[in-house]
Image: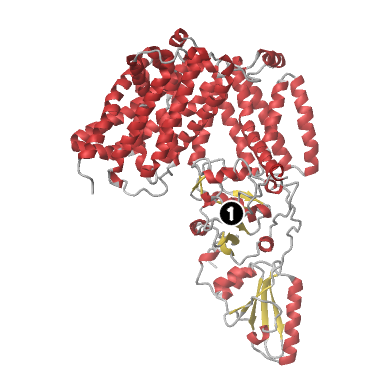
Amino acid sequence: MGNGGIDLPEQKRDSRTDILDSCKRSVDFVTTPLSTGKLEFSFSYYKTLIDEEALGHLLHALQASTQAKESGDLNSLLAHAPMDGIELDPDPQRVRKLIFKGYLLAYPGKDAEGECALIPLPAKKGLRSSNETDMEFSVVGPKIGFIEDLDTNIHLLRAQLNTPDLLLKEIVVGSVSRSRVAMLYIDGIANDENVAKMEKRLRDIDFDVVFDTSQLDQIIADNSRTPFPLFTTTERRDRVVYALITGQVAVISEGSPYFITGPSTLFDFFLSPEDYFLPWVLGSFFRMIRIFGVIFSLFASSFYVALMTYHYEVIPKELLGRLIYSRENVPFAPFLEVLFLEITVEFLREAGARLPSRIGQSLGIVGGVILGQAAVEASLTSNILIIIVSLSALTSFVTPIYKMSNAIRFLRFPIILLAAVWGSLGIAIGVCFLLVHLSKLRSLGYPYTVPFFPVRAKDLKDSLVRSSYSVTGSRPSYLKPASMRRYKPKAERRANDFDEE
Amino acid sequence: MDKSKSDKYTLSAVHLFFLLYVSLVGAGLMDFQRHVAALSEQDTWIAVLAASLFIVLLIWMMYGILKRQEASGAHLVAVNKRYFGSVVGAALNLCFILYFLWGAFLTLRFYLHVIEVWIFPEMNQWPLVLCIFVLLYYTVSGGIQTVAGICFWGTLSIFLFVLPQTVLVFPFLHPQNLMPAIDHSAAAIFGSTRLMAQQFLGCVALMAVYPFIKDGARSAKWAYLAAGAAAFIYIVMLLISIMFFSPQQLKETVWPTLSIVSIIHVPLMQRLEYVVLNLWLLKMVSNISLGLWAACHSLKQQLRVRPRIALAGALALFLLLFFLDNDPGDTRKLIDMYAKTGELLVFSYIPLVFVISRFSAKSG
């Protein structure tokens, strides 16, 4: 076998026997004989990959048929096999690929070089079946999420999108994991160019093991030198369906509960499916609260540093008195004070994320209450800063997509540093860098800050506000969808009782 | 060089609004009242209006020039080469490139003087200057898309500040300052108009960005709107300043716009100019980036210098100029020189080329 089994795809000259031999080095690869009246058959398979119950059914069916007919031919034997998708005389490449996907290789005698067949008996063990949306929770609306099984996920999507236009393309990624990566889009809505671009990027991937779709996200992203996620990552079905019907392309890899959808814009990360389930006035209000929260989270503690270090004059004297009183025992510069507290919050978050949920809860109490209280009493920080930092930590979690809230929490630190050096001018420099960076970003070749820059006035109706369904009948134009119309809203009745009574 | 720009580099027509607005409204918004209103006092609004109309006329002329060019030659460099021959045209182009750089440098220098006086009198400015240079390089190296992006945010930020500010200073205004209306001689108003028009010298940037605008000929609407918005901002700031300060005060106040902001109180904040002035950086960066981009791009078209090298060179030149020009008085003189040159290079040049293009043979 030369250089071992790792470089699987390239060894074209191998025969089926070579493949079987190389597999046999593992003890879980078994070859069992099945003798019928005239001939003997051998079945080779990984017993850890196939469904034993299905194998039992198969053997039972075969036994029954051979007793009836006494035929020695593999083909006629397999005609009685109770499963679909049997491949006759596959080439060695195909054998190598499918034997790892839970297929069984059947051949007469002991020679696999002659006629043979691959019979699918895949087992789905060890996959979780609960598909609640844990990470992206919503109070209103469906709570259907995805799980680690690709076929289940696609089933979930098809169950909601009952159209033959929902097309699925499968691409195999990963030289070792050989993961099936599914790319979904709706033909006639998604722009063909986007589909082609996404497919090309996926096909160009050279990687070993795909653990999660978010790795693909990074590999196919337009720009890897950015903290911002360039594709939306989601585990919610409604979000993926919504992305598909607006003309985006969705990608999921086998073994991952997360879809990525793209092209995405900055604002996609601040939408929650709940916005669409609540009346539009409330949906818009909560969306604006969320965006305000993000801005607050980015700048609150750096603003504190700037004001405390350089611009005392900005604070009115009544408040300044309080601030001085609360800070008079703190021996650090505001910058260190903020950094200490912000990093504490990051520790708490990181520890909370790694710990089992029950311990995590008590950790929250320890961190939030005891540490905060003790830090103030020990004069390590001021009361007001505790309020600001905890508020900004809270607001950083209002973004519905976890990756975006990570980006935002990361970005606070350079801005705090700039604020410590140049006060509010430093913050302004940070804002400039941020805006320039955002203007430069592209997701699948599309500008990231659309519909603000480049300005697309028509798409503004579902950006900062979520307008009523009677005006959002068309798809966002920045995705250049093949057809613009989503649905036709009924003309609103504008009669006034006062006029008519 | 740029026959048919691919979709990636072009901008839809609406972005011309932001680009042109930024080129029209610059750092001068902080102190133009003081100079412009010196001559014609409460009647200066007429001057602002007249200057704006003049700019609208210039934009119309620029469109007249640009529409007569082939698609591949509808920009400053090609126009100069076409009408003035390759030698004189090249010299003119170099003048314009230097002029763009000069304008960008003065904006930065002016702004940093304000920062120095108002916020950080003791600070060593070099680290700050270097940081801003990195920012500028990062912006301009992103190309016209990024420059337009920062222009968009710059425009937005000014509108976000100026309009609430107008409302908040309302209680402090004395409308009687505007009386008696139309009390000054035509010469005084003309003098003010001339000074005001100098605020709009950046308008020639239109000739550089034009080929990047999708269906350029139909973008005129946005150009005029930008001129209108610029006129609106200037008139609002002027009227507020006239009603806020007495005429003598206005002559003595160095940065009237900032002095007005400093009176505003909002809950939790006073002395807002510390915050507002810093956020002006966004606007300043957009002005400077546009100037740098125009210079580097024109240099590429004229001498085939790689824009990123040209950009690094321009920033190095800025650094040198920072060593030489350290005094606000010098900067003032440079700004006056810039204005005088601009009258020649922009205000005389555009009508001249307009007339030439009118009578020369129509391009094929």
Color scheme of the displayed model: secondary structure
Residue A471 in view = yes
Q: Residue furthest front?
A: A501
User: Residue A90 is drawn in which quadrant?
Assistant: bottom right
Q: Quadrant of the C terminus of chain A?
A: top right
Instruction: Find residue A453 and report its horizontal and vertical position in percent.
Output: 50, 40
Instruction: Give percent across and percent down for residue A125.
Output: 74, 63
Which quadrant of the view contains residue B301? top left
The answer to whether residue A336 is left or right of residue A93 is right
Q: Nearer the viewer, residue A320 or B342?
A: B342
Of the pair B66 and A135, the residue shown nearer to us: B66
Q: Residue A489 location, x and y as percent?
A: 63, 54
Q: How many marks?
A: 1
Q: Which residue is mark 1?
A: A246
Which residue does the image show at 76% across and 56% down from the upper left? A130
Give neighbour class at mark 1: few <14, some 14-19, many 20+ (Cα, 10 Å).
many
Q: Is residue B307 above or below residue A216?
A: above
Hey, what amino acid is under mark 1?
Answer: Thr
Give the letter of the chain under mark 1: A
- Give the left or right position of residue A404, taking residue B232 as reference: right
Can residue B115 be seen here? The reply is no
Closer to us: A344 or A264: A264
Identify whether B90 is placed above or below A151: above
Q: Secondary structure at mark 1?
A: loop
Q: In the figure, A242 relative to A151: above or below?
A: above
Examine the image and state in which quarter residue A465 appears: top right
Tell me where residue A415 appears, x and y as whole percent. 57, 29
Q: Residue at x 58, y 54 (%)?
A: A246
Spot the residue most to the top: B248
Q: In which quadrant of the rendered image does the N terminus of chain A lie?
A: bottom right
- Residue at 67% across / 14% down in the picture? A320
